[in-house]
Image (cartoon, rainbow, N blue to C red):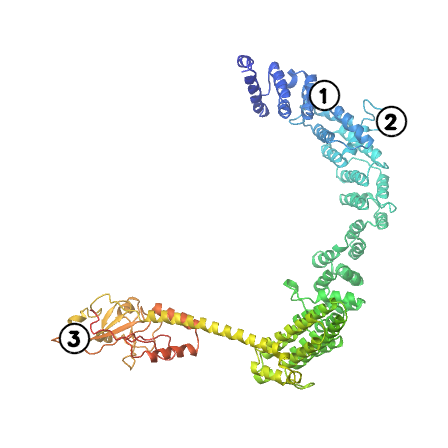
Amino acid sequence: MFNQLYDRLLENSVAKGVFLEALESYIVADRLGHLTTPIMRDLLAHYHGNGMMDSLERCIVHLDVTSLDIQQVVQVCWENQLYDAMLYVFNSGMNDYITPMERLFAVIGPPLTEGRGLTDEEVVMGNKLLVYISCCLAGRAYPLGDIPEDLVVQVKNQVFEFLIRRHSGDSLEKEELFPIIRTLLHFDTREFLNVLAMTFEDFKNDKQALEYQQRIVDILLQVMVDNPDFTPSQVGGLFTFLARQLAKPDNTLFVNRKLFDQVLEFLCCPDDDSRHTERQQVLLELLQVGGVVQFNEERLLTLAEKANFYQICEFLYEKKHLFDRIIDCYLRDPLRKGEIFSYIHNLLSMPGYSAEEKQTVKDKVLQHIQELVTLDPSKSADMVLFHFAEEVQQIISELQDDQLLFRFLSCLLEPREGHLSGIMLPLQRDLHELLLDLLCRFGPRQLLGFLQTSQHYRLEEAIQTTQKYHHSEATAYLLEMKGDVHGAFAVLLETLKEKLSVLTAESERADAGGEERDRDHTLSRVKESLNDIIELCHRSSDSLDQQQREVLLLPCMGFKVLWFPLLETMMASQKLVKGLNDEHTFEVLKELTMKVLNCMSSFIPLPTIIQRILQDPVYGRGKLAEIQGLILGMLDTFNYEQTLLETTTSLLNHDLHWSLAHLRAAVTRGLHPRQDHCNICLQQYKRRHDSAEEIIVFSCGHLYHYQCLQQKACGGGVTSELNQRWSCYKCSSSQGGRGGTTTELKRGRITSLAQTRVTSVHHDGGAEANGKKVFVEATLDSQQEQSWDQLRCLYRGPSRLSILAELSQCQSNEKTGLLMPTQPGTESFQLKLSPPPLIEE
């Protein structure tokens, strides 16, 4: 393929290119690791010439590059940013592991030293450099494979020597010591320390490696400590790295403890407010990985308190089991103050803490209860319900501010669901009455809702409290609960009169050129008050008879009327406003008066209302025009309700007619026998001419002689022959039942409830024309019974049954039959028909 075939392909450039590009998949899969020098040269030229740089890099790192021009390949890789391929060529082609690092360092070092930002390309180079160092120190080749075993130790030593160089190869006079480590720390401190940490994991019995480890740690401390170029986070990251190394059981590192104290002073400097959260987080990580053993805990606690490092204080207090002091840490920490409730709940709920420790926490919470309630009344209430139910009175006594107490009690006593709903507080009634008083003062809008949902207050005391603060709606609600409807009505009516007086005064000011905004607000308040009193009248009138609806004896008002005082109040205010130049207010009051009339007409007859209006002294001596609109509005309402009633009655009658027509069609349906012989004696009934015979036909199609069926005891045993009840003998036998004498058939035990008895008389010499009259007796089958049940459900009541009785009386002499009730208490009907003498014809 690489000799004769490739020589033929060289004659055609397209074929050559296709061939070279087809090699990529085999090279990447390591199925083709060595190419001849001409093909390698042509492959490099083709991929480079066509801009296939990614494919070229993938191929180079899988090929043996010893047959290539190394300098040419390196130059191509560097110019096209193929850093993986460049590192691979240096390593595998020349066994050089240091030169590629020097070239990358020469690019990223100067910008970092000068404090400039790196470009995206330089960031990629720096990341590859860190990964390359990690691979070399771990004995792995970059970007894939392993370093030859005979070169692993040599490569590690070379890399360590490169890292601890005091100066770079082309150093300037101003260059600081240890530029390699300094540059890597500036590039990414945490990742560089992670690389070192992974490398130190393998250092156990290698004396040379342990010496390099101690040397690198000393350089890190020398470079970073007391260097303002590094942030507290970077310095803290270094000491966190050191604390992890020192905490190992086989640790051989030595770090001067004074350096830890020096870092502690740096991180806990109280005069430096910059990066406060960052410095605290770094110190906390240092303590959590075992660095606490490097410090004097008392001095650490003192410095943390001065620096307001409350998380550090919490860490130390928790070690000493001083959980009550942690409460102070949360309260002082502005960033974590809201988390104190979760901490208290977890500590008091979870096992693992002694009773003494929990009690000290409870005492501390009670000391700061006012501060906690101020912070979040809702969470404080949940905490009290869970853990401080017995100390509620003590907590209330600690809350001196009434506003604060109101917010706390509102959250504490609000209706709850779930596991908190069953918790009962001591002195529940006193708490609710205290909250009622506070609601009257600070939350009047929530007062009525509280009274409707709470059941833990005394009625008389609640009425006195609402009267004390002049909350009329709440007082009326309580009076109505007490059963004093008259008192509730009087309170609401007085409130309505006050608002109407204010409205009249504002209308006078509007007539004089005042603003309309206050008047509109007062109108909305009047509407609300009127709606409240109308709802009260509705609720009360539903439970009163006609006389009580019209006249009520009110102890404080004498002989008065329930609805009429409201009507009189609205008409009086309407008359007062009419004289003013305020058409809008007058129209609104007129609409409200009509609303009162419409509502009261549902309980009081219309003539009574009109008579009362005409007897009123205000309208009795006036002209008809003054009350014309009032009466016309009432008549319109009457006409509307009359039309509504007629329409409803018509719809009901139509439905009733439709249902009865369908029922009648069902019960007058004819029966068709399956055979012309009796199913008991098997004789054809038409062949017996010697005497009259009576035939019974069931809706199931079976036919019997009357005498045969009677002998089998399928009759009902009723004294009246016409009311005899029958069951089909054959169907009853097939169902395992047995017909017997019964006064009422059980539904579902027989095939059919409909049966027909036919009397047929045959005489010689044309006796057919003179045959005696026959009759048919029938009841409903299962389908007809279902139709009738549906009808009874729709129109249940005596009026519907009277309609059926009337129909039966009107049609008793017609041949089509009629519907009439059977026995009292039953739900079936009998259909009596008079068919021709010969039913079979």
**Kind of element beneath mark 2:** loop
Q: Nearer the viewer, residue 306 or 485?
A: 485
In the rendering, at what x and y percent does residue 324 appear? 79, 57
Q: Looking at the picture, which amino acid does disc 2 mark?
A: Lys
In the rendering, at what x and y percent does residue 442 appear? 76, 68
Q: Looking at the picture, which amino acid does disc 3 mark?
A: Glu
Q: Nearer the viewer, residue 238 or 250?
A: 238
Asked if marks 2 and 1 touch (Cβ < 8 Å), the reply is no
Nearest to N terminus: mark 1 or mark 3:
1
Quarter of the C terminus within the rendering: bottom left
In the rendering, at what x and y percent does residue 239 appear? 80, 39
Within-10-Å neighbours for mark 2: few <14, some 14–19, many 20+:
few
Residue 777 in view, yes or no: yes
* Mark 2 lies on residue: 174
Badge nearest the viewer, 1 or 3: 3
Badge nearest the viewer, 3 or 2: 3
Q: Residue 213 occupies which quadrant of the picture?
A: top right
Q: Nearer the viewer, residue 534 or 517?
A: 517
Left or right for 546, reference 383: left
* Mark 1 lies on residue: 96
Nearest to N terminus: mark 2 or mark 1:
1
Q: Looking at the picture, which amino acid does disc 1 mark?
A: Asp
* Mark 3 lies on residue: 768
Q: Residue 820 occupies which quadrant of the picture?
A: bottom left
**Kind of element beneath mark 1:** loop
- In 3D space, how far apart are the residues under numbered discs 1 and 3 (Cα atoms)? 135 Å
Residue at the farthest left position = 765
